Amino acid sequence: MAFPEPKPRAPELPQKRLKTLDCGQGAVRAVRFNVDGNYCLTCGSDKTLKLWNPLRGTLLRTYSGHGYEVLDASGSFDNSHLCSGGGDKTVVLWDVATGQVVRKFRGHAGVSTSQTTLINASTWRSILKVNTVQFNEEATIILSGSIDSSIRCWDCRSRKPEPVQTLDEARDGISSVKVSDHEILAGSVDGRVRRYDLRMGQVFSDYVGSPITCTCFSRDGQCTLISSLDSTLRLLDKDTGELLGEYVGHKNQKYKLDCCLSERDTHVVSCSEDGKVFFWDLVEGALALALPVGSSVVQSLAYHPMEPCLLTAMGGSIQYWREETYEAEGGAS
């Protein structure tokens, strides 16, 4: 006699605040989990990058070397290196264990002749910040997106100062870059999301019409999620560009805010300028939860890769959230 398989557990949303950490680095511009979700990175307006154990609330190391605020960071697959980018126009490769700078890449500081005919050099020096950084899967290449409208690919093993490739199809600043095993997904202020297929050597473009603030792949790799300054998130079929869903109710009209999908692709998650994090059912599009975080803008968020666990950033602190049924080791929360 065959017994029926148990029903899959209903998805739980992280709505119980376990920790609030004062990061002590000015405003937290971004918070990011490492690859396995055991640690997190915070990017500060005080020019530092910090590594934490968020559950214990323990600061593990501070990385200093940027000349201006740090806007984004990413960890390598083996947790041995970090990369970061910021307002000083540089991309920095760090050794996690020693806290030392391994390399600094400065190519975004350059201004092309065509660009200087449109905007004077002093203006370019003030705006050429690096918005977003990502490692490729093997952590041999760092990809960086800048307000200079380019994505640059830096070889971590080479001593050459130039990028190995520059993707310059965007007509305005790059706000978001995500990487899979053979694809690069980029969102731009020009209202287009571009997908570069490295195997086929092709670029695919979808027009949203409003400046894009964040993009990401679904965890199954079949869809792309796009956030834009019209307070709307859109789910697109990655291959056809078909609009599969729209998600509204949050506020995103001024700032570059994060969005993502939950660990099982069941919910769409977004920051909001009204101090909340919004969760929508992916399939039905209905609002499932508006999670109050505070009275200011929720600047950044990160979702755990395997568990219903959320990090949010507001002002100078980060908040650590778990599902209601979660109990920390020893029963302590």
Image (cartoon, grey):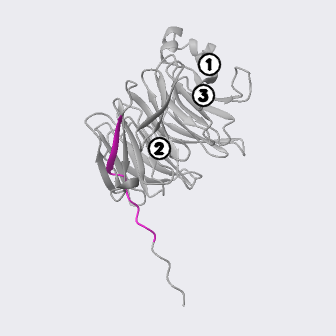
Q: Eyeballing the image, is 170 above or below 327?
A: above
Q: Nearer the viewer, residue 259 or 140?
A: 140
In this figure, which residue is indicated by the disc labeled 2? 226
Q: Residues within 10 Å of mark 1 (few under 14, many from 20)?
A: some
* Circles 1 and 3 in contact, beta carbons < 8 Å: no
In this figure, which residue is indicated by the disc labeled 1? 106
Distance (Cα) linking label 1 and label 3: 22 Å
- Report if residue 11 lies within the magenta region: yes
- Report if residue 34 lies within the magenta region: no
For the record, the magenta segment spans 8-21
**Type of the residue with mark 3:** Thr
Q: Residues within 10 Å of mark 3 (few under 14, many from 20)?
A: few
User: Hey, which quadrant is residue 152 in on the image?
Assistant: top right
71 left or right, relative to 314? right
In this figure, which residue is indicated by the disc labeled 3? 98
SS for dot 1: loop
SS for dot 2: strand
* Circles 1 and 2 in contact, beta carbons < 8 Å: no
For image coordinates 61% across by 23% down, the residue present is 101
